[in-house]
Image (tube, coloured by chain):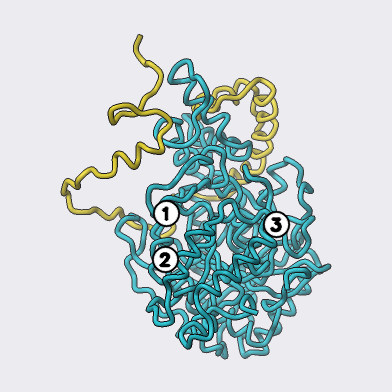
Chain colours: A yellow, B cyan
Amino acid sequence: MSLTADDVRNVARLARLGADDARIAEYAGELSNILDVVAALEKADTDGVLPMSHPLDLTARLRADEALPVTERDLFQSIAPATADGVYLVPKVIE
Amino acid sequence: MIHEKSIAEIVAARGTGDLSAAEVTAHFQRRIEQFAGGLNSLITRCDEAARHQAGSIGSDAPGALAGIPIVHKDIFCTKGVKTSCGSRMLDNFIAPYDATAVEKLAAAGTVMLGKANMDEFAMGSSNENSFYGPVKNPWNTAYVPGGSSGGSAAAVAAGLAPAATGTDTGGSIRQPAALCGVTGIKPTYGRVSRYGMIAFASSLDQGGCFARSAEDCAAVLGAMAGFDPRDSTSVNREVPDYSAALTGDIKGLKIGLPAEYFAAGLQPASRAVIDKAIAELEALGAEIVEIGLPHTDLAVSTYYVVAPAEASSNLARFDGVRYGYRCDNPVNLEDLYTRSRGEGFGKEVQRRIMIGAYVLSAGYYDAYYLKAQKTRRLIARDFGQAFEQVDLIAAPVTQAPAFKLGEMGDDPVSMYLNDVYTLPASLAGIPGMSVPAGFVDGLPVGLQLLAPWFEEARLLNAGHAFQQVTDWHRQRPEGFE
């Protein structure tokens, strides 16, 4: 499986990873090599095999549906890159 | 010397007043001062806090591990202490809470000396992927310590702490334990809480520990393990007394040798060490039988779909908004995301995120992700069938001892193929352990023991029995005596 630079650009966009053209070219080679290893899966006979999403086939445990107090906002925001008046700041989204 | 004592010996000496917790901590802190910089095994030291805490632990302190110094892999959140996960992305992250494993070990009385270096976000098998630079193997500092918990393994090997925590997603406890000549155990998936353990691949990640012996690992694992309502995949099942299970008797235990783990690829010198270790187990009364794990050859390709897919989803949270690295002067929200992530993550992490995004993307999901989930079941089934015949499995951890720093270059694939003996147990979720078994050219070799789901006690007892008749785990690298 060989990925082109455009394939990698598309995946990088999906993953929100910024990379310049030189890096994109390197990634194309490296990711293609990884997909070559992964290609061994194609030959495996998995007819009738159920997908295994979890090692213990657990079902999700639910807690009681009770509202818990929101605490420690100041502590959590003390490690944020930018906040003001209790909200997180990002560049303007709507002009 | 205090660093040659077992955990039980240190605890006993503290109880009788022969040693104080302050003396014990000071001793290991002196060794950290002397050696940690050269090995690059720690990212953060907690000198003041450790001194303070140790000073408050008297001879009558109740915890099972009261006064035992410990190093935590920097993947575990530690309240008020930098928790970097080996990444530039979290270089400025001061965790606002403790991971459950950290909390439980603190409640047992351990004293945190610092945070161990690791491959970035636990992605790697050599510790060369850390933002803070590679860790060096104490047995030969030109060699890698293994990864991703390389700092933890190197710290225990060099006698910088009696124990260290680690995590294992595809071998990240067993492989560095093998390469550094220490004992390391990855329990059954769900046994140790993942709460506060920074997620890489949520269906695989499992916390565990390193120490010099199975006996010490039993004490530490016993304190870490147990149900946690804050982790939805934590298993509500009683934790047996692992230390009490160490009878040293393995007479009649059926141990299977999977042919697939002894095939081409395993270096002859490593194989000779493993063969000798198996002969020791047989001499102790274990019955050795050949078994098959026929889907082993699918493990690498299965893992490198499942783990990156889960990673791409888990690591989506690092967006430069709420915590962690943010790029300078973002022009818009898209730019904030892409540059923060592009600059904050290292190359290997970005490769895995992209592979994950690719295998989950429209048109490829069935061919890759769904297919890998099916082959994962085939691999897990192999173990289920094998454990109908045998009580334990014995095998090598790696095909060869540690390789040189830089030897693998920047080729991810050659590194991935090395994980072939550790990935299957992670995919199946069974417990596994590495026990020091000998040396090849001065570099340690580990014997891997695997047990059925939740049979950690059996695993630890087999390791303990082996360590009663061998002294590989007592060896220290030259210069670190």
User: Residue at coordinates 69% horizontally, 44% vertically from top-left?
Assistant: B413
State which mark lies toward you, 2 or 1: 2
- Which chain is indicated by disc 3? B
Residue B386 appears at what percent x and percent y? Answer: 54, 71
Local crowd at mark 2 within 10 Å, few (<14), some, or many (≥20)? many
Residue under numbered circle 2? B106
Mark number displayed over residue A54:
1
Residue A84 appears at what percent x and percent y? Answer: 32, 26
The secondary element bearing badge 2 is classed as: helix
Query: Circles 2 and 3: CB distance less than 8 Å?
Result: no
- Which chain is indicated by disc 2? B
Residue B445 appears at what percent x and percent y? Answer: 72, 69
Name the foreground residue: B425 vs B154. B154
Residue under numbered circle 3? B39
User: Residue at coordinates 44% horizontally, 52% vertically from top-left?
Assistant: B77
**Compared with residue B421, is residue B357 higher up or lower down, i.e. above or below?**
above
Rendered image quadrant of residue B215:
bottom right
B149 with respect to B454 (left or right): right
The secondary element bearing badge 1 is classed as: loop
- Distance from the alpha carbon under mark 2 to that under mark 1: 30 Å
Name the foreground residue: B244 vs B386. B244
Mark number displayed over residue B134:
none
